[in-house]
Amino acid sequence: MQLQNSSYKPSEVLSPIDLGSQTTETSPVEAIQQWLVSQLAKQLSLDPNNIKVQEPLTRYGLDSIDAVTLVGELEDWLELELPSTLLWDYPTIEKAATFLVQEFDVAAALNNVNIETATTAPQEKAEKSSGWGGLWNRISGS
Amino acid sequence: MHPLKQYWVAEALEQDLGDPCNPDSLMSFQQVVELDEQEEFPTDLLNWLYNWKLNHYYIPTACGGEFTSFEEFVAFVRVMSRRDLTTAISFTTLFWSYLVWMAGTDEQKQRLASFIKDHNGAMCLAYSERAHGSDLVASDVQATKVAGGYLLNGEKWPINRATISGVTFVLAKTDESGGARSLSLFMVEKSQLDPNTYYNLPKILTHGIRGSDMSGIGFQDCFVPESSRIGAEGAGLEWALKGFQITRALCAAFSQGAADTALRTTLNFALGRKLYGKTVFDMPQPRRTLVDAFLDILICDCATIGAARGFHVIPEQFSVWSAVVKYFVTTTLESMVTNVSVVLGARYYMRDAHDWGIFQKVVRDNAIISVFDGSTVVNLHALLLQLRQLAKQRSRQKGRNLEALQARLAACFSLDQSVPTFDGRKLELFSRGADDVLQGLALALTQLQSLETDPDLDSDVLQQIGGFTHLLLEELSALDQSLENSTFEFGHDQSPELFDLAKHYCTLHAAASCVHMWLHNRHHLGAFFAKGEWLALCLRRLALSFRPAHSLASRINDEAIAQELLQLHMEDKLFSIVPFQLATSKVQGDQTNATSELQLQA
């Protein structure tokens, strides 16, 4: 896999549904960027097309503690142990993805993971716009 | 002396302070209520503690002090807190020193250790600001880089000991563009400052801990040398959050000291007061209330002591453990104090009647514990962000690495084992889904099953313990399943239902702590502990928060708990799973008890 992201603009081409078909072509940097864009879109209720990889994540309403939790999600996906302050030190999607590819064996990690988990469209959206969506409609006795 | 060495410092401090119901004792109820009425800072009491060299127990042995164990720390903070939270909270501001022990340079450590030991130095934590509350990143206090150091500008408020302290740990913005790396932490030594460049804000009048130096500090182009910065520039938030993991969990010790006094003074009343031809304690309703209060203390004890030891064993899980303990213990014991106030009746509200009015002071003072160092909401929020990962990790780890898990649980909960040296550098901003207490629940159930043949155990009691533990596991599985299937969004508009879910998690964690504590200490904490009736009743009590009473096994006879409570009260022992000896209370005039047999120092 190659780094080929100099002219790559996920904000123009990405939508969570498109991603599945692109996975075989994407570079590690792109794959990580796509994953972060789709997570951010899903977990902040944003249109992925409006997320720019060069913008600081805080711009989208991700606060410092959320950023730590997002690293946890990233670890889960890549099955790698990452610095918990990753997104503090590399506060844009572009910087974080580049750092990861430079410092970790991301290519191997990506081969091991189910790329689908990164790129599936957000689960069916529950009625609620915040919190854990329809969780409370599915369980009783809260 | 108590067989467990980690309780010797607390016992010795107790003996030297004497019976708080004796007005001639140091830190007697009469004295601390008077100080509170006058809203006076307890200078003499703090000096006495410094002379006793209690401050040495805040400095790790590697830095020239006496600190080796958080379990020991919790025990002596309970001793101070059962007498006076104003003094205890003021004295334990020394605990901010942990920022330096964790992140400071050798030179900073040396300077601070000398400040604490040789100069009876006090410190404060200047994080919060009038306009920003818990939102630390929004800090308006700036640290602007200049040659050789920084210029501080802005105000911190409200700050405990802001005026009296000699060292102020200031969180300030070093990068105006904002974000998680925009803050740096400074150990500001007032003796090195130009006095014209900083000022203190007036004392704040508060609901409780009235004598506290609750005030604020402001800076105007105040130069601090580069050597005062703790850790790297931009590392401020990281160290602030890690420092909170320590202090939040240990805040529980204040609540436990306060709860002990609330229950003890209520018992003083309930045992002496006769109505309808019997004592209040002999009437079923007040007796049940008092027994339940004792159970609450025992539950919180298991969570607090387990966590205090856990710091040494699994610091990397403390973003979860500290949030659980800070939320659960402080709010549970606040409710407990309210519950027993009913038994005390009108006297709970009187400022000069019944044991010098100590109860109403406890109610007022104790109310701040769940608020400071991160409020209930802050702690639950920190936890709910991690719940999905906790659920995922539990499912992933199911049945794996059981031996290692078992070994860590034994190290956390077996009070007869010594703990490894605490290493603050192992604290992590999130726990990567690990929480051994709940991860180990299935393991605990297996251990319980193996006890079925133990002839020393009552089969009904064991059956209840097993049944309730099974119920916990069921609840945990249901929780995990809901979490795994759910979607999630970041942000600060989390639904109230999510906060309820985090509370539920805390209850399960506390309940599991009780089970682990019993399993690992059945052979060395005495007959009452070993029989486990208390555990069956504690688990049932906790289960009532998520299941209706009629669906649960009925309550076993609690007479043994009532008798233990009476016994501990009569013998002046702490209401605890580790009921170490308190200073003995005798009728006034019997001064023999003022002589300590347990002097630690010359």
Image (cartoon, coloured by chain):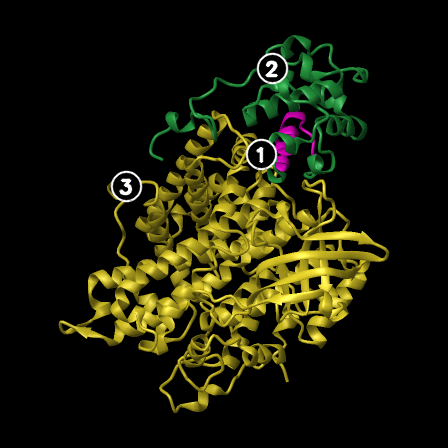
Chain colours: A green, B yellow
x%, y% of residue B424?
68, 53
For badge 2, the amino acid type reads Pro
* The label number, if any, that marks residue B586 in the structure image: none
Q: Chain of mark 3?
A: B
Query: Which quadrant of the structure image shows residue B396?
Result: top right
User: From this viewpoint, is residue A127 visible?
Assistant: yes
Question: Of B249 and B478, which appears nearest the observer?
Answer: B249
- Segment colored magenta: A67-83
Q: Residue lying farthest right?
A: B147
Q: Chain of mark 1?
A: B
Q: Are marks 2 and 1 on the same chain?
A: no
Q: Is residue B311 left or right of residue A4?
A: left
Q: Is residue B564 left or right of residue A60?
A: left
Q: Which residue is mark 3?
A: B548
Q: Which residue is mark 2?
A: A16
Tag in front: 2 or 3? 2
Q: Are marks 2 and 3 on the same chain?
A: no
Query: Which quadrant of the structure image shows residue B130?
Result: bottom right
For badge 3, the amino acid type reads Pro
- How far apart are labels 1 and 3 at the CA level? 34 Å
In contact (CB < 8 Å): disc 2 and disc 1: no
Q: How many marks?
A: 3
The answer to whether A54 is drawn above or below residue B599 in the figure is above
For badge 1, the amino acid type reads Arg
User: Which of the two labelled residues, at mark 1 and mark 3, occupies the earlier sequence position?
Assistant: 1
Tag in front: 2 or 1? 2
Q: Are marks 1 and 3 on the same chain?
A: yes
Disc 3 packing (10 Å; few <14; some 14–19; many ≥20): few
Q: Which residue is mark 1?
A: B400
Q: In the image, what residue occupies the spot 73% across and 29% down?
A: A96
User: From this viewpoint, is residue B440 visible?
Assistant: no
